[in-house]
Image (cartoon, grey):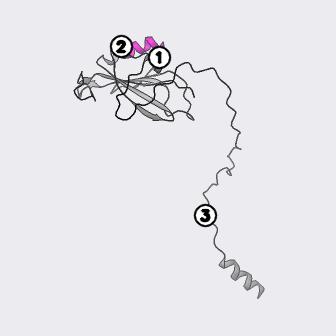
Amino acid sequence: MLLSLMLMVALQQQPPVPQPFPKPGTSPAAQPAKPTPSPTPSAPPVTTAPPPAPAPGQPEAAPTDATLGVPVYPGAQFLRSYDAGRGQRYYIFGSTAPFVDLVTFYRSALKQKGELVYDVPATHEFDVGKYNEDRMAFPPGVTIKDFQSSASEGFPNPKPGGQPPRFKSIIQIVPVTER
């Protein structure tokens, strides 16, 4: 009788809540959690902080070479900046210069070869700082994209009535930021 009473009690108990398998941190290959090292003091940032986003309804001022930490191709037209997240902004410039001229300019100015990441449409990237995935949404750098081809007359100027009506190439700059 005692056995049947224990069996009835056991059957009335709620089944256990399902757990993910394997449980985080319990697999044989799981490594013990390592303490996060304290950040060490570093030298002050080399570049200044980029300008903040403009107030709503206000035109955005073009950033300077000094605020970006890299030169802007001569004659390139500032189009606008975007919030990249994690306290970063990226800046878009249009240029009527051919893609090859822009790549040559940045190779000389940044003293590095960069990398052709796409053949069509041609896209070339230059890294200009260390990427920290814990603090940054994008790696600091300069990206050049060719927008003129047999299929495209170029990137349309987003400014109504803006001149030129289309840009052969676009330059994206993600400045080096130290926080």
Q: Are marks 1 and 2 in contact (CB under 8 Å)?
A: no
Q: Which residue is at 65% across, 79% downward? A: 12
User: Of helix, strand and loop, which one carries label 1?
Assistant: helix
- Gap between marks 1 and 2, in whole Å? 14 Å
Locate the C terminus by quadrant: top right
Q: Tell me the amino acid under the disc marked 1.
A: Ala
Q: Earlier in the sequence, mark 3 or mark 2?
A: 3
Of the residues tagged 1 and 2, which is closer to the observer?
Answer: 1
Q: Which residue is at 50% across, 21% downward? A: 128
Locate the N terminus by quadrant: bottom right
- Gap between marks 3 and 1, in whole Å? 57 Å
Residue 169: x and y, percent? 32, 22
Q: Tell me the amino acid under the disc marked 2.
A: Pro
Q: Which residue is mark 2?
A: 74
Residue 40: x and y, percent? 68, 27
Residue 165 belongs to magenta span: no
Q: Which residue is mark 1?
A: 66
Q: Which residue is mark 3?
A: 18
Over which residues does the magenta segment extend?
102-115
Of the residues tagged 3 and 2, which is closer to the observer?
Answer: 2
Residue 29: x and y, percent? 67, 46
Of the residues tagged 3 and 1, which is closer to the observer?
Answer: 1
- From what the image shows, is residue 58 above or below residue 3? above
- Gap between marks 3 and 2, in whole Å? 62 Å
Q: Tell me the amino acid under the disc marked 3.
A: Pro
